[in-house]
């Protein structure tokens, strides 16, 4: 990171940002064409490894892209706040963001899907509980996870 004074170095502070927000932007590469999509997510942080969990329908553009190239980037940020100034070029914006890269892996077994969907539901609802997932519903979705290889945090105040 070029501006070290804006870097969030604390893992706990980075995880607090990930925990506080519900939408992640997943960036994929379709050959030379970039593709980005906002997704709800769940996550785990175990043994110093961040894993993001997602789900979608069984067909669609993002799944086609991931099957060709499972390398991805993600971004999570807060809504921020404009900081006015006396001159246009001195305006600033107060925000926090997390950006990382990793590889996406499809989850195929019912157990893997239930784990992913449970993490997603726990994060989205704030409820630390188990959820019941209908077998038919599990067949209608694709679950996948991103094993994050590295991620950084940035804040501007």
Image (cartoon, rainbow, N blue to C red):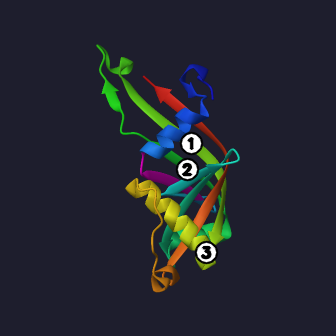
Disc 1 + disc 2, Cβ < 8 Å = yes
Q: Regarding mark 3 in the picture, which secondary structure is present there? A: helix
The image position of residue 5, as x and y in percent, is 56, 19
- Residue drawn at (66%, 63%) of the image: 70
* Secondary structure category for the residue under label 1: strand
**Numbered mark located on residue 74 in the image:** 2
Q: Residues within 10 Å of mark 1 (few under 14, many from 20)?
A: some
Q: Is residue 105 above or below residue 24?
A: below
Report the residue at 63% width, 70% height from top.
106
Task: Say the numbered circle drawn on residue 133.
Answer: none
Q: Is residue 107 above or below residue 7?
A: below
First reached walking from the N terminus: tag 1 or tag 3: 1
Quadrant holding the N terminus: top right
Neighbour class for label 3 at 10 Å: few (<14), some, many (≥20)? few
The residue that disc 3 covers is: 111
In this rendering, the answer to whether 152 lies above or below 136 is above
Query: Gap between marks 1 and 2, in whole Å?
Result: 6 Å
Name the mark on residue 99. 1
| Image-based side of 46 in relation to 33, left or right | right
Question: In which quadrant will I find the C terminus?
Answer: top left
Q: Magenta residues?
A: 21-28
In this rendering, position of residue 8 left or right of residue 77: right
Would you say residue 38 is visible in this rendering? no
Residue at 54% over, 71% down: 114
Give how far apart the Cα atoms at labels 1 and 3 are: 29 Å
């Amino acid at each position: 990171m070029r501006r070290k004074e804006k870097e969030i170095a604390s893992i706990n502070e980075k995880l607090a940002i990930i925990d506080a927000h519900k939408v992640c932007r997943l960036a994929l590469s379709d050959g030379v064409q970039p593709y980005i999509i906002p997704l709800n997510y769940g996550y785990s942080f175990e043994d110093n490894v961040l894993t993001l969990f997602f789900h979608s329908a069984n067909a669609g553009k993002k799944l086609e892209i991931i099957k060709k190239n499972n390398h991805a980037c993600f971004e999570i940020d807060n809504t921020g706040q404009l900081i006015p100034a006396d001159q246009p070029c001195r305006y600033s914006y107060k925000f926090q963001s997390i950006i990382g890269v990793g590889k996406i892996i499809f989850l195929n077994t019912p157990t893997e899907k239930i784990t992913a969907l449970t993490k997603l539901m726990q994060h989205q609802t704030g409820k630390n509980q188990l959820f019941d997932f209908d077998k038919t519903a599990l067949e209608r979705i694709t679950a996948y996870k991103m094993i994050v290889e590295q991620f950084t945090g940035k804040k501007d105040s």
